[in-house]
Image (tube, rainbow, N blue to C red):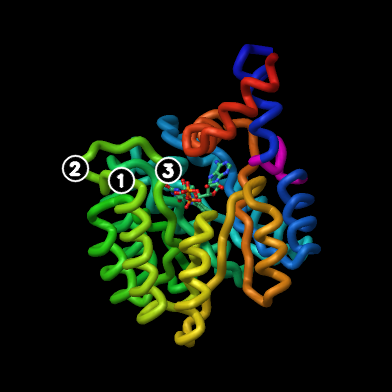
Amino acid sequence: MGLKELVVLPVAKKWIAGPDLQSAVKDAQNANSRGIGVVVNFLGEDITDPAAMDAQVEEYLRLQQAMADSAVKGFVSVKLTQLGLGADEGGMKGRLERMIANAERLSQLLWIDMEGSAFTGKTVAAYLEAHQKHPGTGIAIQAYARRSEADVKAVLDAGGRIRLVKGAYKEPQDFVFPTKDDIRKNFDRLMVSLFESGDGFAIATHDSVLIDRAKALSDSSHASFRFEFLKGIRDELKDELVASGYEVVEYLPYGGNWWAYSKRRIAEHPSNVWLLVRSVV
Ligand SMILES: Cc1cc2nc3c(=O)[nH]c(=O)nc-3n(C[C@H](O)[C@H](O)[C@H](O)COP(=O)(O)OP(=O)(O)OC[C@H]3O[C@@H](n4cnc5c(N)ncnc54)[C@H](O)[C@@H]3O)c2cc1C
């Protein structure tokens, strides 16, 4: 076992359902029993070997089927670089099509995560193309990105579904808004557009200011929406929102490729660095 496994894995486990599909389904069932829906992601990104991309698809097809067989309330969410966006764009489209077709067969939605800025334009374009044929698809949009106002408009104009997030990648200043306050303001602006002209969207943040604002906006909107959270973060708030009658969904990643995901979780909150330090002293 390397240093990463020894130091980080025990802490990372709170964000990850487990190593395999069975642990993901079990975690999903636990969430469902608390009245919480799930979005399940098989951990992986930046895949360059076509055989490995195909293997990701096979895993997702098994996951979709297992969720249907176990009557899990939830959907799958995929990163397009798992399917070849970075290295085999033509092949990626075919792999995505297989996943969407399977989701449709099982009456499930299919969500697409948003990745780093090198892939934003291509991810939005691939989503819009897929959505023309398959309305049961959704895409994450990052409020930290200056381009997102235009992306939200394009997706809403196409009748698409959005998961609004702040954004998790380290990006150059010309791509993102400079301060946390600017990002929160942009999240608020985009959220107003969603409540005005979107439907079936997700407000995916742990930020209480934005969650309270979404509650207020929902009072004067007929749009259907849900709050989405990451596994292992703000669990009490999830239960409070369910008890208040809001739809709540938890994002459940699983699988052996936990490092890149965990690095982003550690970087976004200082308390996690403290957890790591405490785990080794
Ligand atoms: C369902 C879901 C799906 C997502 N999908 C994507 C995606 O496709 N692409 C993408 O770039 N990003 C995605 N993200 C991540 C997102 O972009 C943010 O990085 C992450 O949610 C933290 O931002 P925040 O809105 O919670 O606000 P923050 O200001 O970061 O956090 C608000 C509060 O939440 C708590 N908190 C937040 N993060 C942590 C943490 N790691 N550990 C402990 N406490 C924490 C703290 O109390 C903090 O004060 C997703 C997030 C969610 C909830």
Indicate which disc, 1 or 2, sits on the residue closer to the N terminus.
2
In this view, 239 is above or below 180: below
Q: Residues within 10 Å of mark 1 (few under 14, many from 20)?
A: few
> Image point 38% across, 52% down: which residue?
93
Front residue (pair 59, 268)? 268
Q: Amino acid at mark 3?
A: Ala
The answer to whether mark 3 and mark 1 are in CB contact below 8 A is no
Residue denoted by label 1: 179
Q: Which residue is mark 3?
A: 168
Of helix, strand and loop, which one carries label 2? loop
- Residue 209 shows in the view: yes
- Up the image or down, 154 lies above or below 122; here it is below
Q: Is residue 220 above or below residue 44?
A: below
**Within 8 Å: ligand 1 and the Cβ of disc 3?**
yes
For mark 2, what is the residue? Answer: 174
Indicate the position of residue 281 as horizontal and vertical percent values.
69, 14
Q: Amino acid at mark 1?
A: Thr
Q: Which residues are magenta?
A: 15-22
Residue 76 part of the magenta-drawn span = no
